[in-house]
Amino acid sequence: MPVGELCNRDVVILRREDTILAAAKLMRQHHVGDVVVADDSSGFRRPVGIITDRDVVIEIMATELDQKVITVGDIMTGGLVTVKESLGVFEAIQYMRTKAVRRLPVVDEQGALVGILTLDDLLQLLSEELAAIARLIAHQQQKETQDRR
């Protein structure tokens, strides 16, 4: 399954010049733990960074900086890693492990943002697949019991 089929396409997006306060309010409003920072260049949104709720706490709150003045561009994680929407789920898992990230912006062939894949998305998918396997085993055992009566 390609990650483009699994990723969340309702991504919360900000520009570099938006404040940390704006990021925190959007995270609260949308019940998410991250905001993707994107540049609107060449007619599409290109992801350039990410801000997490942890970044806000550690970089701003714990150091008592003014969240009304500091911008997301000031603290966003640089060197953003992204994946193309055609990448397979298991390849994405390996990539996340290799890069030590929990969130991956998903882009199209031109590099435009189309969604975000999170560790939570993957855990939900894998738990559903494991549950289906468990049901298969139980069904097979029931069928075998019926067939041997």
Image (tube, helix red, strand yellow):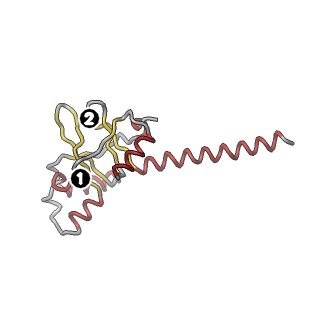
Which residue, given by chain and number where applicable, does mark 2 sit on?
A: 112
User: x%, y% of residue 147?
Assistant: 82, 39
Locate residue 33, reporting x and y percent: 33, 55
Query: Is 90 rendered above or below residue 61?
Result: above
Query: Which quarter of the figure is the C terminus placed in?
Result: top right
Q: Which residue is mark 1?
A: 77
Q: Which secondary structure lies at badge 1?
A: loop
- Residue 109 x %, y %: 30, 30
Q: CA distance from mark 2 to mark 1?
A: 18 Å
What crowding class fits label 2: few (fewer than 14 Cα within 10 Å), some (14-19), or many (20 or more)?
many
Residue at the image position 25 percent from the left and 56 percent from the top: 25
Residue shown at 36% from the left, 35% from the top: 85
Mark in front: 2 vs 1: 1
Q: Residue at x 61, y 44 (%)?
A: 133
Give, as a three-letter code, the residue at label 1. Thr
Vertical side of 91 occupied by 67: above or below? below
Dividing the picture into quarters, in which one does residue 81 lie?
A: top left
- The three-letter code of the residue at mark 2 reads Ala
Q: Position of residue 79 (x, y in %)?
A: 23, 47
In the rendered structure, find residue 25 and report the number of the disc placed on it.
none
